[in-house]
Image (tube, grey):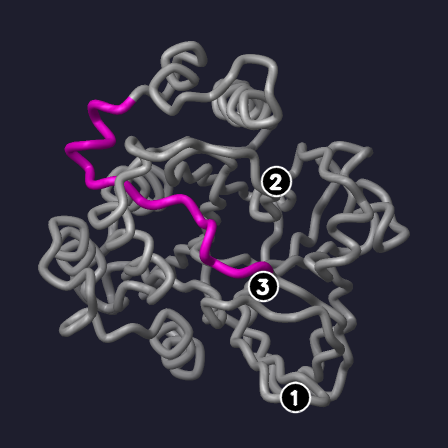
Amino acid sequence: MHHPTALLLLVVVAATVVHGHAAAGTPAALFWEQSLPDSPMPTAVADLVQKGIDHSPLLEHYSALPSISSCVLVDNICSPRTVAETGLFFRQTQLRPGAIMTVSFPSAADEPAILPHDVAEKTPFTNLDDVLATFHISPGSAAAAQVSDTLHRCQEPPLAGEVKSCTTSLEATVRSAVDDMLGGAGAGAGDGVVRAVASQLPRGGLPRRPYVVQAVTRVHGDLYVACHKMPFPYAVYQCHMTKLGYEAHVVSLREIQGDAAADMLAYCHMDTSSWNPAHPAFEVLHTSPGGSPVCHFMPYADLGFVKNINRA
């Protein structure tokens, strides 16, 4: 059975009233409503969908930008200093009201747009030279290195026990996560309904400040998929799931000496034995593969999909 508090939080944290939102009526929004009728499209995702319609990245020059979303991948080699400054990773013991966390999350202004599905289908992705030419990226530049790294990560095989995919449109992301990885979304509570959840962050980000944890609510589920944005000229999601232990929580943060606040989706990985030993989380949290659980926040417009399996 679904835990009622968790279901409420899934709606609250993913909350955007798609009806009347800028993305309402778009093919992506209609597809979302049909595929995930119990989960409103998160505001951040709706904004990036509309951005893909209003400001095509095909007409813009792509520059390398910092990305923290890919830093949570189990094989990443992001700078420990970078992740330490954001507060992206934290210990499971910090999941309690009254805990103090120092975090920062960047503005969403430079987030890549989610392309309409029909446009994404025609836009270069797998071939590095074609991507560089299409987006006017100089070979050997920092931007070219980012694109190359994303393609490499998407093309390398999954870790043992992991299922993963890279997708270039919202429709493809939902299909991959919900249908391929979670086995489809049921039509009712007894059918294994899948719900989407995301962090609710201000578009301007969160300034680096101490924040107090006001509440922590477990997002109960039997299966979890996480989809992370990758550095690329347009929105590319890498989705993955594993049978290794997961926990998901909604962490409500409020700035101690200010008004900034956010409801953050957080995943805790209970088994990190297959992770890259050079993963920055281990250095930041002073642990190692197979050691204490590693928790991380889900940055702006990253997506989680949760399925509860009915056990009659």
Q: Write down the residue under mark 1.
A: 258
114 or 192: nearer the eye?
A: 114
Q: Write down the residue under mark 3.
A: 266
Query: Which numbered tag is attached to residue 7?
Result: none
Packing grade of label 3 (10 A; few <14, some 14-19, many >=20) is many
Packing grade of label 1 (10 A; few <14, some 14-19, many >=20) is few
Q: Judge depth for marks 3 and 1 and give the one in front.
A: 1
Amino acid type, label 1: Gly
- Quadrant for residue 89, please give it: bottom right
Q: Judge depth for marks 2 and 1 and give the one in front.
A: 1
Distance from disc 2 to disc 3, alpha carbons, whole Å, reads 14 Å
- Secondary element at image label 1: loop
Please give the name of the residue rendered at 43% of the width and 10% of the height, measured from the top-left corner.
129
Please give the name of the residue rendered at 45% of the width and 49% of the height, measured from the top-left corner.
111
- Secondary element at image label 2: loop
Q: Is residue 235 above or below residue 44?
A: above
Quarter of the figure that contains the C terminus:
bottom left
Q: Say if mark 2 contacts mark 3, CB within 8 Å.
A: no
Residues shaded magenta = 106-123
Q: Say if mark 2 contacts mark 1, CB within 8 Å.
A: no
Please give the name of the residue rendered at 20% of the width and 47% of the height, measured from the top-left corner.
53
Amino acid type, label 2: Leu
- Quadrant for residue 170, please give it: top left
Callout count: 3
